[in-house]
Image (cartoon, grey):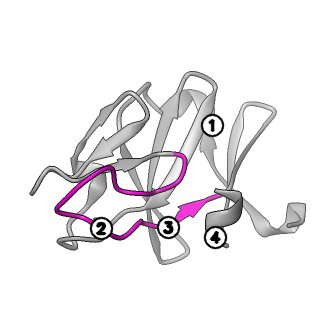
Amino acid sequence: MTDTDFLRVCALDELPESEPVAADIHGTSIVLVRKSDEVFALYDECSHAAVALSEGDVDDCSIECWLHGSMFDLRTGKPSGPPATTAVPTYPVELRDGDVYLSLKPKTTENA
């Protein structure tokens, strides 16, 4: 992946700590979550019920779907239990000079 694959999304200090933030990046719905000096990006749709994960709650390193309670790992997108059984895509994030950059090329399971 090259630097040209990454798009500037926002300044790091614009993201609240441990609160999901919805973003539309070139037509792709993304949920961003800041944990200290790390930012996670997932596709903003629960794989079980097609509702926005950005409307859910963050707990430790997971985000919970508000509708049926499915929990997804912020690092891998994998669900931790039912009703969801399929992971949601995660996206590479880089922090550069206090700004958040994101690639719209989803991570693969091997490098998630």
Q: Does residue 107 show up?
A: no
Q: Earlier in the sequence, mark 4 or mark 3?
A: 3
Above or below, 58 relative to 112: above
Q: Which residues are magenta?
A: 75-91
Q: Is residue 77 left or right of residue 12?
A: left
Q: Local crowd at mark 1 within 10 Å, few (<14), some, or many (≥20)?
A: some
Residue 57, by quadrant, is top left
Q: Which residue is labeled 3 in the image?
A: 89
State the image coordinates of residue 91 (x, y, percent, origin top left): 60, 60
Q: Local crowd at mark 4 within 10 Å, few (<14), some, or many (≥20)?
A: some
How far is the residue under mark 4 from the one under mark 1? Answer: 18 Å
Q: Which residue is labeled 1 in the image?
A: 11
Above or below, 18 relative to 72: above
Q: Which residue is labeled 2 in the image?
A: 85
Q: Which residue is labeled 4 in the image?
A: 104
Q: Which mark is residue 35?
A: none
Q: Is residue 29 left or right of residue 37?
A: left
How far is the residue under mark 1 from the one under mark 2? Answer: 33 Å
Residue 102, by quadrant, is bottom right
Amino acid residing under circle 2: Thr
Secondary element at tag 3 = loop
Q: Residue furthest right?
A: 2
